[in-house]
Image (spheres, rainbow, N blue to C red):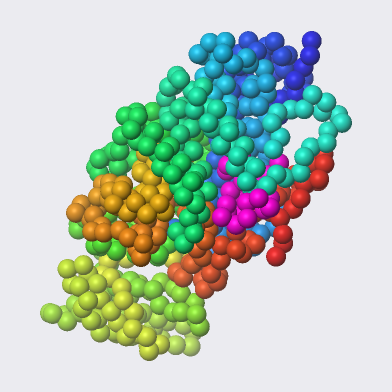
C-alpha cells in the first residue's frame, strides 16, 4: 500500500480523530482519504505555533510597543532590526508555514472536487490555508509589492509532498508577483468551494474574501502612486464581506471587551486561530503573545508595554484616564491598555505624579515621574534624586504651567533647559525605568489570564481595507464613510469632517494603527505604503534611526537551516 509522507500531523489531531500514528510520520493513503478531516485539522494545528511567531514578526517590528530592555531571545532581532539568518523563531515560522502548505496540498491532491459539498468544502479549507500561508510568507520574506514585484523574490512555490522524496530538486524562490498570484489563485478557489460555514475558527467563504481584500490592498501601490486595478479588487472583495450580512461590528461597549470573547461568540471575527486552555501550556501563558505584554494575576512576564507614541495617539482626541476614581476612556481602544498603578506602601494610597518624556537625540528619551505637591492653588513637580554615599537626597522643584487643566495637561521647564509637556496621573510602577502600560488585547479570552485565539481577519479591518482602497481610487466620500464607521465606534462624536488627497494617507494610516494594533499588521502597513518606520519614544531600541521602506532590513532573512537542508537552490535575501 502506498504511503505518503506527512510533514506533520499534530498529536492532538491524531488523538482526537482516533487515527493511529504510523512509523516515520507516514500514513496509509486510504486512511487519509477516509479521514481527510484528520489532515485538515492537522493543517489548522500548524497555525497555532505559526501564529505566535507571525505575531512577533509583524508587531515587534512596528511602533505600537516597546520592550523594557534588550533580550537574548531570538525575538529581539525583530524589534531591534538586527537581522540574522540564524534565528530559531524565524525557522519556526518558515517550517510551520510550509508544513501547513504541504499538508493542505496533499489533501488537495487526494480529494476529488465535485464529489459532494462536504468534500468540496474540505478542499476549500485547504486552498484557504495554503493561500494564506503563501501571502504571509511572502510579506515577511519578500519586499513590499510596490517595489518591482516582477523581479524581487518571494518564496518557493512547493505545493505538496513530491512523489519521489529521495531525489528532490525543489525550485528556487518565485518572484513576489508570482507568489502573490499563487496566493490569490488559492484564495479564489477557496471562495468558490467554501459553501458550508462551520464557524469563524474554520476557513469560510467570508474568510477567503476578507483575505483577498487584504492581499489586493497590499498590491494597490502607495498613496502617491496607486494601482487602480488592485485597489478596485480590494474594494470588490471588501464589498462581498460587508454586504454578506454574515458579520457585524460590535458596538462600543462590546468592542471594549473584544479580547474576552471566544471567537465563536464574536460576530465581528471572520477567522481566528482557535486556542483552548487545555492545550495552552504554562510556557504559553508566560512567554506567549499575551504573557509578554502583561502580567495578570501573577501570570505572564509582562516585559513589553504600549509605546509612548501609541499612548499619545489614543489621547489625541481627549485624554484617556485609567485611574479608578476618575476612569474615563475617550477612545474605546484604550480599553486594551492597563497601566499598573502602584499604591504607596505606607499609606496604601495612590501617589500623584507629573509624568512626561524627557531627553532627545543627545541624551536619549526616557520617562520621568515627579511627585506632585500642592499648596493652596500652587502646584509643583518635585524631582527626587536619591541619597548616595557622598551626597544627600536632593529635591528639585519645578513650576508647572497649565496647558489644559481639565485634561491634567501641564508643562515644566526642566533643568536641561527644555520645556516638556506631560500630564497629571498616579504613579505607575516601573520596570527598568519604564512605566508598565500593560497591553491586554491578546489576553483574557474567556477571562482566562493569557489565553488568546489570534485573530486573522475581522470586519473592522475589512472596512479599513475598503476605506484605503477607495481613497487610492480618489473616492474620498466613500472612503470617509468607511473610515468614520470605525472611528465613531471607538470615539463618540469623533468623526472626521473631511477626507481628501492631502490628508487621506495620514488619517487612514492613523486609524489602522489605532484599530489594528497588536494584530501583527503595523510594520507591514507602514512599509507597503512606502513610508518609513519612526520610533521616537523611550525604549532600548535605536530611538532615532528611521527605517525606510527600501531598507534591506524591512524583510527577514531566509532561515539558514532552511537553506542548508533545501534540495535545490534557495536564494538568500540581500544582507545590505
Q: Residue 352: where, in percent of width, then height?
A: 26, 69
Task: Locate the C terminus by quadrant.
Answer: bottom right
Q: Residue furthest left?
A: 376
Question: Is residue 151 rendered magenta in the image?
Answer: yes
The answer to whether 410 is drawn above or below residue 247 in the figure is below
Query: Residue at position x 57%, y 52% from top?
Result: 145
Q: As displayed, is residue 552 above or below residue 402?
A: above
Magenta region, residue range: 134-156
Label total for image: 0
Would residue 393 appear left or right of 133 to someone viewing this image?
left
Classify residue 402 as left or right of residue 158. Answer: left
Nearer to the camera, 125 or 441: 125
Q: In the rendered view, tell whether residue 425 sits above or below residue 464.
A: below
* Residue depicted at 53% across the width and 10% down the height: 116
Quadrant assignment, res 495: bottom left
Per the image, is 525 magenta?
A: no
Q: Position of residue 254 (x, y in %)?
A: 27, 39
Residue 122 location in percent, x, y? 55, 20
Query: Looking at the rendering, which quadrant does residue 137 occupy?
Result: top right
Quarter placement of the N terminus: top right
Q: Is residue 20 left or right of residue 264?
A: right
Query: Which residue is found at the position 60% from the left and 63% from the top?
Result: 550
Picture residue at 49% right of the left edge, 59% below the top:
225
Residue 308 can be seen in this image: yes
Task: Pinpoint residue 193: horizontal percent, then vertical percent.
Answer: 51, 22
The one of 436 and 306 positioned closer to us in this rendering: 306
Q: Main secondary structure of the magenta part?
A: loop
Camera-nearest residue between 261 and 511: 511
Q: Is residue 310 visible?
A: no
Amino acid at each position: 500500500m502506498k504511503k505518503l509522507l506527512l510533514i506533520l500531523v499534530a498529536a492532538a489531531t491524531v488523538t482526537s480523530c482516533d487515527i493511529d500514528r504510523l512509523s516515520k510520520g507516514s500514513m496509509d493513503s486510504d486512511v487519509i482519504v477516509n479521514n481527510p478531516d484528520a489532515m485538515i485539522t492537522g493543517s489548522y494545528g500548524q497555525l497555532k505555533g505559526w501564529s505566535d511567531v507571525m505575531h512577533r514578526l509583524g508587531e515587534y517590528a512596528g511602533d505600537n510597543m516597546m520592550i523594557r530592555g534588550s533580550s537574548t531571545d531570538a525575538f529581539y532581532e525583530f524589534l531591534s532590526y538586527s537581522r540574522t539568518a540564524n534565528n530559531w523563531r524565524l525557522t519556526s515560522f518558515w517550517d510551520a508555514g510550509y508544513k501547513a502548505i504541504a499538508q493542505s496540498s496533499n489533501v488537495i491532491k487526494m480529494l476529488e472536487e465535485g464529489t459532494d459539498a462536504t468534500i468540496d468544502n474540505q478542499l476549500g479549507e485547504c486552498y484557504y490555508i495554503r493561500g494564506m500561508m503563501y501571502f504571509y510568507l511572502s510579506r515577511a520574506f519578500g519586499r513590499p509589492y510596490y517595489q518591482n514585484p516582477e523581479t524581487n523574490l518571494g518564496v518557493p512555490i512547493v505545493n505538496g509532498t513530491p512523489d519521489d522524496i529521495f531525489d528532490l530538486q525543489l525550485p528556487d524562490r518565485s518572484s513576489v508577483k508570482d507568489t502573490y498570484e499563487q496566493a490569490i489563485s488559492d484564495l479564489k478557489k477557496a471562495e468558490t468551494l467554501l459553501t458550508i460555514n462551520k464557524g469563524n475558527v474554520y476557513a469560510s467563504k467570508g474568510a477567503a474574501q476578507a483575505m483577498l481584500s487584504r492581499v489586493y490592498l497590499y498590491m494597490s501601490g502607495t498613496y502617491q502612486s496607486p494601482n487602480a486595478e488592485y485597489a478596485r479588487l480590494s474594494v470588490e472583495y471588501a464589498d462581498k464581506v460587508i454586504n454578506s450580512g454574515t458579520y457585524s461590528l460590535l458596538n462600543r461597549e462590546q468592542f471594549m471587551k473584544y479580547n474576552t470573547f471566544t471567537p465563536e461568540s464574536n460576530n465581528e471575527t471572520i477567522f481566528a486561530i482557535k486556542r483552548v486552555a487545555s492545550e495552552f501550556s504554562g510556557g504559553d501563558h508566560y512567554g506567549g503573545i499575551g504573557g509578554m505584554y502583561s502580567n495578570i494575576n501573577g501570570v505572564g512576564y509582562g516585559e513589553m508595554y504600549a509605546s509612548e507614541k501609541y499612548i499619545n495617539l489614543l489621547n489625541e482626541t481627549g485624554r484617556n484616564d485609567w485611574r479608578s476614581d476618575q476612569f474615563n476612556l475617550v477612545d474605546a481602544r484604550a480599553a486594551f491598555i492597563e497601566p499598573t498603578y502602584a499604591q504607596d506602601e505606607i499609606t496604601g494610597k495612590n501617589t500623584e505624579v507629573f509624568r512626561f518624556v524627557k531627553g532627545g537625540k543627545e541624551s536619549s528619551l526616557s520617562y520621568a515621574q515627579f511627585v506632585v505637591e500642592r499648596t493652596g492653588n500652587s502646584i509643583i513637580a518635585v524631582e527626587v534624586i536619591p541619597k548616595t554615599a557622598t551626597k544627600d537626597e536632593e529635591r528639585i522643584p519645578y513650576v508647572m504651567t497649565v496647558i489644559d487643566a481639565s485634561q491634567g495637561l501641564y508643562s515644566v521647564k526642566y533643568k536641561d533647559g527644555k520645556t516638556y509637556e506631560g500630564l497629571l496621573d498616579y504613579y505607575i510602577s516601573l520596570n527598568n525605568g519604564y512605566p508598565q502600560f500593560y497591553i491586554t488585547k491578546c489576553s483574557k479570552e474567556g477571562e482566562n489570564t493569557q489565553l488568546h485565539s489570534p485573530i486573522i481577519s475581522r470586519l473592522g479591518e475589512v472596512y479599513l481595507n475598503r476605506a484605503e482602497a477607495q481613497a487610492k481610487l480618489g473616492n474620498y466620500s466613500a472612503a470617509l464613510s468607511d473610515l468614520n464607521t470605525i472611528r465613531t465606534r471607538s470615539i463618540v462624536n469623533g468623526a472626521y469632517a473631511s477626507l481628501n488627497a492631502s490628508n487621506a494617507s495620514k488619517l487612514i494610516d492613523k486609524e489602522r494603527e489605532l484599530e489594528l494594533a497588536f494584530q501583527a499588521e503595523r510594520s507591514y502597513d507602514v512599509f507597503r505604503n512606502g513610508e518609513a518606520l519612526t520610533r521616537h519614544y523611550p525604549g532600548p531600541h535605536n530611538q532615532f534611526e528611521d527605517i525606510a521602506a527600501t531598507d534591506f532590513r524591512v524583510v527577514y532573512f531566509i532561515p539558514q537551516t532552511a537553506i542548508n537542508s533545501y534540495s535545490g537552490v534557495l536564494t538568500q535575501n540581500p544582507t545590505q
